[in-house]
Amino acid sequence: MGHHESLPLGHTHFAEPEQVYHSAKFGMWVFLATEVHLFGALFCTFAVYRWRYFEDFQQFALSLNWRLGGLNTIVLLTSSYFMVRAVDAAQKGLNKKVNSFCNLTLLCALTFLVVKFFEYRAKLILHEPPIFPHSHIFYGLYFTMTGIHGLHVLLGMGAIWWLKMRAKREEFSVTYYTPVEVVGLYWHLVDVVWIYLFPLLYLLGGLA
Amino acid sequence: MFTFMPEQASEWAPYVDWLNDYITNISVFCILGITAVMLYFAIRYRRRGPDDVTPYITHSASLETAWTVVPTVICFFVFYYGFESYHEMRNPPANAMEVNVTGVKWRWDFEYSNGKRTTNELVVPIGRAVKLIMRSQDTTHSFFIPAMRVKEDVLSTVYSYLWFTPTKLGEYHIFCAEYCGLQHSGMLGKLRVVSEGEFGDYLYDRQDPEAVELPPAELGKLKFAEKGCTACHSIDGSKGLGPSLKGVFGGDHVMSDGSVVKADENYIRESIVYSQKKIVKGFEGIVMPAFEGQLSEAEVNGLIAYLKTL
Amino acid sequence: MSAHAATADGKQLNYLNCEKGLWSWIMSIDHKRIGLMYLASILSFFVVGGVFALLVRAELFSHGKTLYGPDDYNVFFTLHGVIMIFLFIVPGIPATLGNFLLPLMIGAKDVIFPRLNRFTYWLYLFGAAIAFCAIFMRLDTGWTFYAPYSIQNRWAVVTATAAAFFLGFASILTGLNFLVTIHNMRAPGMTWGRLPLFVWTLYASAILQIVATPVIGITLLLLLLENTMGIGIFNPAAGGDPVLFEHLFWFYSHPVVYIMILPAMGVVSEIIPVFSKKPIFGYKALVYASVGIAAVSFLVWGHHMFVAGMSNLSRYIFSFLTFFVAVPTAVKVFNWVSTMYKGSISWDTPMLYAMAFVFLFLIAGTTGVHLATLGTDAHYHDTYFVVAHFHYTIQGGAVIGLFAGLHFWFPKMFGRMYNEKVAKFAWLFLFIGFNGTFIPQFILGMEGMPRRYYDYPIEFEPLHRISSIFAFINAAGYAMVLGNLFYAVFKGKKCEENPFHSLSLEWTTASPPIHDNFVQIPRVTTWTYGYGAEHAAEGEAVH
């Protein structure tokens, strides 16, 4: 096998820590690309039906509470800020700070879900007659898109909770903070998706 | 060469077949040629021993350019021929005779411009352009006449269309080509291409010798097959989508609301013409099409007479 | 390559015997073991899908009712499709041969995310388990789940789409793992220009898996929500559009054909140089063709909908774009055949499979032209012509490619050799059975026989009979292939480490490889295909 020389092997891991760090980030970016396609298909579907049932979509958009939607936008943006601070703290190896910024991020995420709960309740229970996903394609899309986004928020909360636990165990350091950065990337995507969803669903019909 | 297309019965068919031949001939030439070269190499250069010396050839810019460009050019021609012919196929002439087609699980309904309605039988005059305007009543179907070389999906949301000019008298298959459930393969129709004169008679029912001369039960048997009843109703007692009609006449039947109905002439007639009025227990939710306005008195009588014989 | 550790009884330690017991397999994060577990799984599902195919062919043996009714028929052809597509051929070559060979070929100890790889396998099995529930729920929509028909058989569709969602997720994660591995785990000196072509095709199909699969994921999720909550998006009664479903469905399901076929092309690109003792001809062209096919595959989904109610302009554009897939495919075929020129060609089983692949894929490709052309597609669409074309692509292409690879890398995987005579005989059976099954179907398609028909007009009966008989010969061929390989796993003759004298990196380690693949990470100094002597015959070397 003449043409393959060999390198000495100094460790038993599959890859260098540096390599793992870059790969994890790269992997997360690729995963985010798949998420963009997932939501992209939803946005396409939304575009098709908004174009086809333009008046309906205009009218039903007014039934959504843009104040609550706007509040949630601010809440999520704030959570992203806290997430950035958590990543920053992790890069400096400050585990306590990571923990507290994770707490703040979780608090925002929870607020988002509570507000979402009241919005859903206003549609499904309080509204007369109640508005269901099958009431109109607009609402079908509204519940689907916000529901799938809400699921992402929940999964993100799980991931941040996991970071929090690891920070409590003092696992992050100036040389190891990959999980915080990777979860941070994911959390920002969740935020970005909402930034598209909010105007698309709440604002395109004008303000009620 | 290598063509097994069905009869050419439309103006459009010879052109499709020509194009098909064109592609097939190139294809067969390429398949046989390349395979022959491959086999020749495999035999001519077969391994004689482990120490065979082989040349180090990695690529050839000119050769590779050639076999990239040539297929590209061929493809452009094929695309163009396909496009040119298809363009015509998608643009029916203004004076085409229009027939409305409705796809229903699992039959084809046709309605002519004078209001005449038929099921599973489309009759058109030779030499005249026919445009079919199609819609589905339930799921997606696809209207396919192999002899005419035309096909188009039939949707429940929008009208779709296709057109052809028949050039040959005869009877041809109409298939449903989009999977539509249980009796998909039973969703068959007949296309009859007839002379102008015969078509006029047909359209205005000026003579329907069968209807006049056949005894009622025979006429009923004919209509039973023609209208697609067999897709759901067996006549041998086996369970289909609808109740079997063996011995149905004269018996007592339990309805979905629990009532018992004796199957007399009035009940049978009602069940054919207004099929949704009474539903036999166990068949709730299965919608039989109503035949209101689609059968003459003689035909309904014939069907009743036929059921009595089962 | 001889100084390996050994077990107490003097046997060489390798990835198979380094740990024992079921638990060591279940918990394994070794890409080689995961590859083998995938292989065992997909081949089992292949057998199940094959049984459904035989049931379908048996019913079609005669006009009218042969064995069972149309309700069973619709369930059987649906399950044949769902199992073969989602459980067998989508994971197919990447999850099995790809998992096993990718790290070995690029000189790495494993894929970059080994734990994710394990999770992916079990996610796949979980999805497969749900898919099997759909069998008992009498799923009868066809593997395409076309709306609005798929809105009527609610719970079976919910089950099947949920299964497909998990299977799709597993497919995405495999693609992601491979993509990052190829980017970041190549051994020193393994530059992009030296990557084996099999790795290049895995790279191209990884991109397809990542980009296309999320779209089918969300589409099937929408269908699931349609069936549970009635969101109306695909339901005409609620103002939804079934054609939108077709668009979203084919946006994935056209590229997925290349997820299946590209790695098979990669396998053939590996086999032909080894068994011809020649460098692969036109390496760069083959790389560009793979990536080009992947790119163009995203622009051609509309050719599945030429008669589905798209606007005329869309039909013209999609037809035009489709022809751009034909060119790189043709280039590949020319390159493979040219590689054999002046070679030293051995007629071993892997090479027989590779040559069969070239022949069958030629038929698949050229009949694809009939379907890409608008004028002829109007006649061929949704007929047996499409069925035959598709099976030539997937069975004649991807499956034959898989078996070519299995016969080629079998000694690598197990250090044993299968019975060569049986393998050749089985190959012949397969080849005859396959062509005998599907050539009549091309003719049926020309005559106008629509697909998915339980029954047919009497004049189609003779060809259906021929097709059915050969289908059983085809199945017997597969039974022989699988039996021969399975027997050889345990009882095959021990063979030398590199029986086919390949120069590729994966053969420089022990066969079967040690747990860590390489004792030392290799340093690569040349490309993979350095066969043949420079200027061996004067004037022959073309540069």
Image (tube, coloured by chain):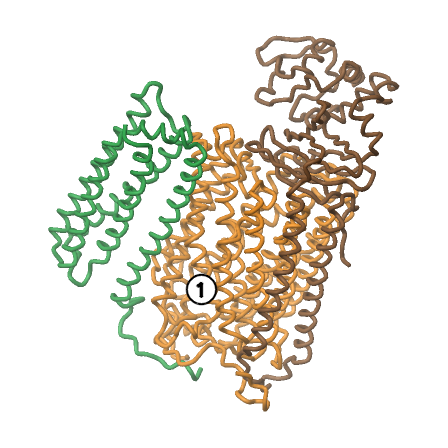
Q: Position of residue C495 (x, y in %)?
A: 53, 74
C370 sits to left or right of C497: right
Looking at the image, residue C195 lies above or below residue C314: below
> B271 or B43: which is nearer to us?
B271
In the image, farthest residue toward the bottom: C538
Looking at the image, residue C351 lies above or below residue A143: below
Q: Secondary structure at mark 1?
A: helix
In this structure image, what is the colour of chain B?
brown
Res C479 visible = no
Q: Position of residue B80 (x, y in %)?
A: 63, 56
> B145 or A8: which is nearer to us?
B145
Indicate the amino acid at tag 1: Phe
Q: Position of residue B24 (x, y in %)?
A: 71, 59
In this structure image, what is the colour of chain A?
green
A127 sits to left or right of B288: left
Residue under the point 58% across and 14% down: B256
In this structure image, what is the colour of chain C?
orange
Looking at the image, residue A195 lies above or below residue B291: below
Q: Which residue is mark 1?
A: C100
In the image, farthest residue toward the right: B213
> A58 or B293: which is nearer to us?
A58
Q: Position of residue A82 (x, y in %)?
A: 16, 47
Image quadrant containing the N terminus of chain C: bottom left
Q: How many marks?
A: 1
Res A182 visible = yes
Chain that bears disc 1: C
Looking at the image, residue B148 lies above or below residue C440: above
In the image, farthest residue toward the front: B94
Residue under the point 73% across and 57% down: B21
Q: Residues within 10 Å of mark 1 (few under 14, many from 20)?
A: many
> B278 or B96: which is nearer to us?
B96
